[in-house]
Amino acid sequence: LPKHPAVYLFHPSQIDRSLTGTDDSVVYSLIPSPRGYGVENYEKVDFIETVLEKIEHHHPGFREKIQEMKIRTPNDAQAFGLYQGGSFGIAPTIRQSAALKTQAKPYPDIDRLYAVGASVHPCGGVPVVMMGATILVNRMEQEMGWKHEFSDDPERVYQM
């Protein structure tokens, strides 16, 4: 695990006060960590403490304002079904970032082979993966000449 982790801190209740219904705040932090690292308990390796210290450095008094904290780790992501707990795809390296990720049609010379998911452009995160799936279906419809028809029959979704 990194000694100096990157920390993305998001304070959505600054934008939408209805998230709490009170004067309290909701804060979300995302800390990229390696998938498949094999850490059973992140508290035992003091990683959570390292993250809190970094946040506290930039936002003094942060820790004393915490009323409730829920921690999700790559272990939780793996239990949810993400390969080795990798929330942002199989290999989130600089060569697997944004437009450099595998494209929806990774091998243009192989007819009807497509890809979608967290490791495929436009990237990870459930909303973006769902958007990527929609973009891919639209592309497949165009390339294959499909016309989408709504049907009550689940076996007959597309008409060629």
Image (spheres, grey):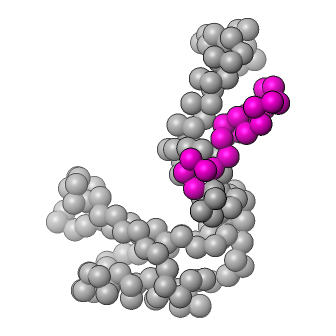
Disc tally is 0
Residue at point 29% right, 58% down? 12
Q: Quadrant of residue 57?
A: bottom left
Can the viewer see residue 77?
no
Q: Which of the pair 64/103 is nearer the observer?
A: 103
On the image, the x and y values in percent for residue 15 come to 22, 54
**Magenta residue check for 115:** yes
Check the picture and name the quadrant holding the N terminus: bottom right
Position of residue 89 relative to residue 106, above or below, is below
Position of residue 136 relative to residue 18, above or below, is above
Instruction: Please indicate whether residue 39 sits to the left or right of residue 58 in the image.
Output: right
Q: Which of the pair 160/23 is nearer the observer?
A: 160
On the image, the x and y values in percent for residue 32 come to 54, 70
On the image, the x and y values in percent for residue 80 come to 65, 58
Position of residue 135 relative to residue 38, above or below, is above
By secondary structure, the bulk of the magenta-drawn segment is best described as loop
Q: Quadrant of residue 109?
A: top right
Residue at point 59% right, 62% down? 94
Check the picture and name the quadrant holding the C terminus: top right
Can the viewer see residue 131?
yes
On the image, the x and y values in percent for residue 16 come to 23, 53
Residue at point 73% right, 39% down? 106
Instruction: Please indicate whether residue 93 sits to the left or right of residue 48 in the image.
Output: right
Range of residues picked out in magenta: 97-116
